[in-house]
Amino acid sequence: MLIELNNLKKININAFQTDLISWFKKEQRNLPWRKDQDPYKVWVSEVMLQQTRVDTVIPYFNRFIDWFPTIEDLATADEEKVLKAWEGLGYYSRVRNLQSAVKEVKETYGGVVPDSPEEISKLKGVGPYTAGAILSIAYGKPEPAVDGNVMRVLSRILSIWEDIARPSSRKIFEQAVRELISHEDPSAFNQALMELGALVCTPTSPACLLCPVREHCQAFDEGVQSELPVKTKKTKTRQVQLASAILLAGNGKILIHKRPSTGLLANLWEFPNVEIAHPLEGERGHVEQLFNTATELSVTLGKVIGQVEHIFSHLLWNIKVYIGQIDGTFAESDEWKLVSPEEMEQFAFPVPYQKMFLLYQESLLN
DNA sequence: TAATCGTGGAT
DNA sequence: TATCCAAGATT
């Protein structure tokens, strides 16, 4: 079944481990989550690093640990502040799952992150990779932690031509890691594979001449390192037209709305907006009507101050930005709030609405 | 399985 | 400018 694992027989496992780990111990980057092996901090870093670059994560990680130094701190933290800590990092369900899982650890495991694959994998947001990463890095367990780096590196080392975009492929690489991993230092081994992928065995133009395990690499031996890994997939982005407004109350406060707890940008704040199917529906009167219905308010729209474009991984937003005012009194709720410009910074807004607010502030200067 | 879920940097 | 990508998980 796992035919490619025949290539494992060609590897001198002991020499491979030694070459890889000694390179890592010498060349590894000094990263804030490598200062100790606190399972909580390892956990936070691994969740932040999901589909996110190291350089992006560093300042978020430092601030997050500053705000929530322990499991107890995060478990008892205000959800609004937790979301604020994640603002701009993306994939916001990660932090909702993280806080939920941390509460679970507090209540069920006495505040100690479990060290068994079965228990840790039950935690929300802890999938196969993150489970293996925590178990190996924090607890020294010889568990595979297969991410994109590991699949790329091992596809080259072992000349594996499986499509790494397919979910089923991960199992092949997990089996390979189980065969290759150092039982003396599983933490260094797993981190070394990822570090190698990040620094040397990069997606395009790998630096094979600098590679510490070049002599173990079957793709290099065959001269096909640039053809691996095989990775299909390409989803096209759908375009969405929105109209949104900065709506001012009589006291100068701005109307904001909390997004639903599921789906895109869940639980973050936004300015009132509606999706418009056709450009014609972008006419002021029509949008005004939609706002009146949605907010049950008397809304008067003013001029369009510009447009905001934002590209997500799978869709493209184009927001037509109005300014306007709401007439009469307004009863706030969990969902709808009136906030002063200064209070805005207490609420977590996704990037497209941050762009929109900047556009509004610029318009005030004219 | 394929789609969903963000963002900013690299090529 | 367009595409791809980066230490994935969930549904």
Image (spheres, coloured by chain):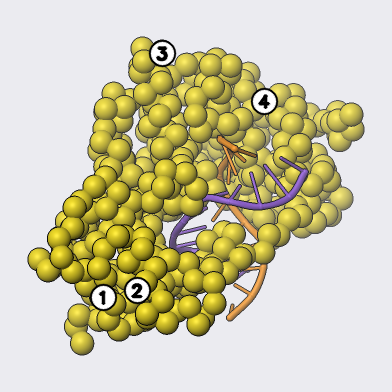
Chain colours: A yellow, B purple, C orange
Q: CA distance from mark 3 to mark 2?
A: 50 Å
Residue plotted at (42% across, 33% down): A98
Q: Position of residue A307 (x, y in %)?
A: 40, 78
Residue plotted at (47% across, 67% down): A275
**Mark 4 and mark 2, same subunit?**
yes
Which residue occupies the foreground of this view, A47 or A246?
Answer: A246
Do tag 3 and tag 4 residues touch (Cβ < 8 Å)? Answer: no
Please tell me the numbered disc located at residue A300: 1
- Placement of the C terminus of chain A among the 4 image quadrants: bottom left
Eye-nearest disc, 3 or 4? 3
**Mark 3 and mark 4, same subunit?**
yes
Q: Position of residue A119 (x, y in %)?
A: 53, 16
Do tag 1 and tag 2 residues touch (Cβ < 8 Å)? Answer: yes
Q: Mark 4 belongs to which subunit?
A: A
Residue at the spot of label 4: A181
Whether A75 is drawn above or below A82: the answer is above
Label 1 sits on what residue type?
A: Thr
Say few, some or many: other residues with alpha carbon within 10 Å of mark 2 (under 14 / 14 to 19 / 20 or more). Answer: many
Q: Mark 1 belongs to which subunit?
A: A
**Sequence-earlier tag: 4 or 2:** 4
Q: Mark 3 belongs to which subunit?
A: A
Residue sitting at the far bottom: A366
Please tell me the numbered disc located at residue A189: none
Do tag 3 and tag 2 residues touch (Cβ < 8 Å)? Answer: no
**Sequence-earlier tag: 3 or 1:** 3
- Placement of the N terminus of chain A among the 4 image quadrants: top right
The local secondary structure at tag 4 comes to: loop
Residue plotted at (30% across, 30% down): A74
Label 2 sits on what residue type?
A: Glu
The local secondary structure at tag 1 comes to: strand
Residue at the spot of label 3: A108
